[in-house]
Image (cartoon, rainbow, N blue to C red):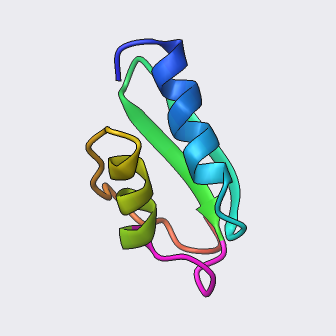
């Protein structure tokens, strides 16, 4: 991810999934935070969506539903 357009594409890609409630890219850190419905989408599915948009993705942490 190199620019704001890249960040916007990743956010838009993730938000297409109805199980995703929020996606926010931190361009400086090269990370995206995603709020999603665990029963509707998986972390692996989110990473696959980002990969399909042409970017690498891997989970860093899972704070849980009450974080």
The number of callouts visible is: 0
Dividing the picture into quadrants, the one containing residue 61 is bottom left
**Residue drawn at 32 percent across, 50 percent down:** 51
Counting from the top left corner in percent of width and height, residue 55 is at 31, 38
Counting from the top left corner in percent of width and height, residue 1 is at 35, 24
Residue at the bottom extreme of this rendering: 39
**Residue drawn at 62 percent across, 74 percent down:** 65
**Residue drawn at 62 percent across, 46 percent down:** 23
**Residue drawn at 70 percent across, 51 percent down:** 22
Q: Is residue 20 left or right of residue 27?
A: right
Range shown magenta: 37-43
In reply to whether residue 41 is colored magenta, the answer given is yes
Dividing the picture into quadrants, the one containing residue 2 is top left
Q: Can you say whether 58 is above or below 67 in the image?
A: above
Magenta-drawn stretch, dominant element (helix, strand or loop): loop
Q: Can you say whether 60 is above or below 24 in the image?
A: below
Q: Is residue 43 left or right of residue 39?
A: left
The foreground one among 17 and 65 is 17
Q: Is residue 5 left or right of residue 62?
A: right
Residue at the top extreme of this rendering: 3
Check the picture and name the quadrant holding the C terminus. Answer: bottom right
Q: Is residue 24 left or right of residue 50?
A: right
Q: Can you say whether 5 is above or below 61 in the image?
A: above
Dividing the picture into quadrants, the one containing residue 30 is top left
Counting from the top left corner in percent of width and height, residue 64 is at 53, 73
């Amino acid at each position: 991810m190199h620019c704001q357009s890249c960040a916007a594409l990743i956010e838009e890609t993730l938000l297409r999934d109805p199980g995703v409630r929020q996606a926010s890219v931190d361009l400086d850190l090269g990370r995206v935070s995603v709020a999603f419905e665990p029963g509707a989408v998986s972390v692996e599915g989110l990473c696959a969506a980002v990969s399909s948009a042409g970017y690498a993705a891997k989970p860093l942490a899972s704070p849980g539903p009450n974080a």
